[in-house]
Amino acid sequence: MNDRRRSLILTGASRGIGHATVKRFSDEGWQLITCSRDPVPAHCERDPNWTSHIPTDLSAPEDVERFVDEANALLGDAPLNALVNNAAVSPKADFQERLGCLNGPLDDWREVFQLNFFTPLALARGFAPALARAGKMDEDAPNTFTRECGASIVNITSIAGHAIHPFAGSAYSTSKAALSALTREMAVEFAGLGVRVNAVAPGEIETEMVGDEYEPLVNRIPMHRMGAAEEVASAVYQLCSPDFSYVTGTEIFITGGQHLY
């Protein structure tokens, strides 16, 4: 890794919002370290900014530890400028039935919280030293970081963490609500390292996971359309840019206004 170029670690990079996000950062010249259960598409392997993709099952704590070790080894002494926690799971019953509090095994809940909540926490801890290296102390103000502080964590939450959603199950929704709360707690604690922590909460975004059953939801969106993965990626990028150097503990809704109802 080149410590003079900004670097990103992102989970769930092979498709959807994650894939759009790494493309946006690559277009801006960032170095990329990513992971997902699936390999990246062949055309992405030719991206000179895509330093490494590490196939990882982030629902397994031992795999999370391995990923942290391998990514830190790739970073070496270089700083890490951004960590984006995007990987998540939302289990469905047969026929896309919503899994609520009264149906579905509790083991499914544990698996959802492991990936959607505990893994972002573990990754933030594991990369905290590398993120801290991106901060710059103010020589004239002891224990104060300059405005050029370059470290940021962005957690991908969801509109489902703030309101009942017809398709997102209870385990997914409550895990995303917990991640929103974790974002606030991390923002306070990581500020001492010079690291900003924010979240983006997407609404109905056109990805591979969206089927025909989502079409009726468009009527509940003031902008009367679904969002694009690239629109979420743009918000994530801006949160990691110097333009947002005084923003931490914030959750941005990428919903076309749907969260207002």
Image: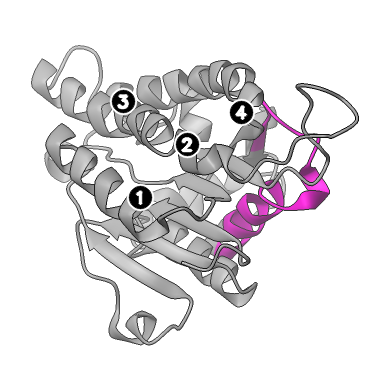
Q: Which residue type carries mark 1?
A: Asn
Q: Quadrant of residue 59?
A: top left
Answer yes or no: do the residues labelled 2 and 3 have beta carbons within 8 Å? Answer: no
252 left or right of 122 in image: right
Q: Give me the C-alpha separation between circle 4 and circle 3.
A: 21 Å
Q: Which residues are magenta?
A: 230-252
- Which circle's residue, 2 or 1, is located before the other in the chain? 1
Marks 2/1 in contact by CB < 8 Å: the verdict is yes
Query: How far across and down, in percent of the image, does residue 27 sit?
Result: 60, 76
Q: Secondary structure at mark 2?
A: helix
Q: Which of the two discs, 4 and 2, labels the residue nearer the N terminus?
A: 2
Q: Hey, which quadrant is residue 137 in on the image? A: top right
Indicate the amino acid at tag 2.
Pro
Answer with mark 1 or mark 4, whichever residue precedes in sequence: 1
Left or right relative to 255: residue 60? left
| Element type where label 4 sits in the image | helix
Work out whether mark 3 precedes mark 1 in sequence or the reverse, and give the earlier one. Answer: 1
Q: CA distance from mark 2 to mark 1?
A: 9 Å
Q: Is residue 113 above or below residue 233?
A: above
Which label belongs to residue 193? 4
Camera sees residue 196: yes
What number is the disc on residue 72? 1
How many numbered dots are placed on residues in this image?
4
Q: Residue at x 42, y 73 (%)?
A: 50
Badges 4 and 2: C-beta atoms under 8 Å apart? no
Q: Which mark is residue 118?
A: 3
Measured from the top left, where is residue 110 in percent x and y?
18, 21
Q: Is residue 239 magenta?
A: yes
**Callout 3 secondary element:** helix
Name the mark nearer the viewer: 3 or 1. 1
Mark carried by residue 129 = 2
